[in-house]
Amino acid sequence: MARLHVPLVHRRLVTTGDDVLHAELTLELKTNRGTWEEFAFIVDPGTEMTTMPAELARMNDLPIPRQPVRGLSFRGQEVRRGLLRARIPGLDSTEYAFPCYFLGAPHAPIVDPKNLLGLTGVVNQIRLIFDGTPSISARYGQLIVEKI
């Protein structure tokens, strides 16, 4: 079984002094030119749908739908429902199709530059395990990614 270990990322909130953790997973995404470009995604098990700013997708020549979904918005931004053709560097060369909501309008300022990897259409293709056991290479634990 193919398996990838990704150390959890730590940062301290200046305002409260709290230590917070998250996992960043690099995905290679297929562009309209047929090339593969790397993008960092925050793996968020509390997020139902993978999201990416539409303008970031447009700037990097990723395929996005021309029209937004009627009646669907997120924090006042229009939403385009599409797919990301993705590979996971370090796992193997399997190509995945992850559903994605592209947020905002192409050519509009990016409101939130984060890419989030959600659960829908992802957990049925790869296994995501959060392990808080510290090690020399992963002081705060790790995200384990497995091919199903």
Image: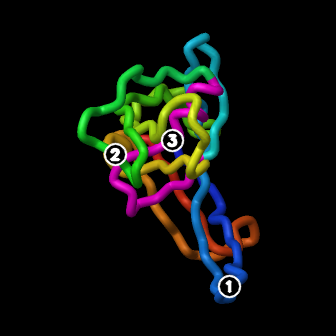
Q: Is residue 57 magenta?
A: yes
Quadrant housing the C terminus: top left
N-term mark: 3 or 2:
3
The residue mark sitting in front, 3 or 2, is: 2
Is any atom of residue 123 visible in this view?
A: no
Nearer to us in this view, 122 or 102:
102
When asked about the image quadrant of residue 17, the answer is bottom right
Disc 2, SS: strand
**Which residue lies at the image location 65% right of the left edge and 74% below the top edge?**
140
Left or right of 34 in this view: 71: left
Q: Which residue is mark 1?
A: 15
Tag shown at residue 73: 2
N-term mark: 1 or 2:
1
When asked about the image quadrant of residue 22, the answer is bottom right
Q: Position of residue 84 (x, y in %)?
A: 46, 30
Residue at the top extreme, as displayed: 33
Q: Which residue is mark 3?
A: 52
**Which residue lies at the image location 39% right of the left edge and 39% below the top edge?**
78
Q: Position of residue 8 (x, y in %)?
A: 63, 65
**Mark 3–mark 1 distance (CA, rounded to whole Å):** 27 Å
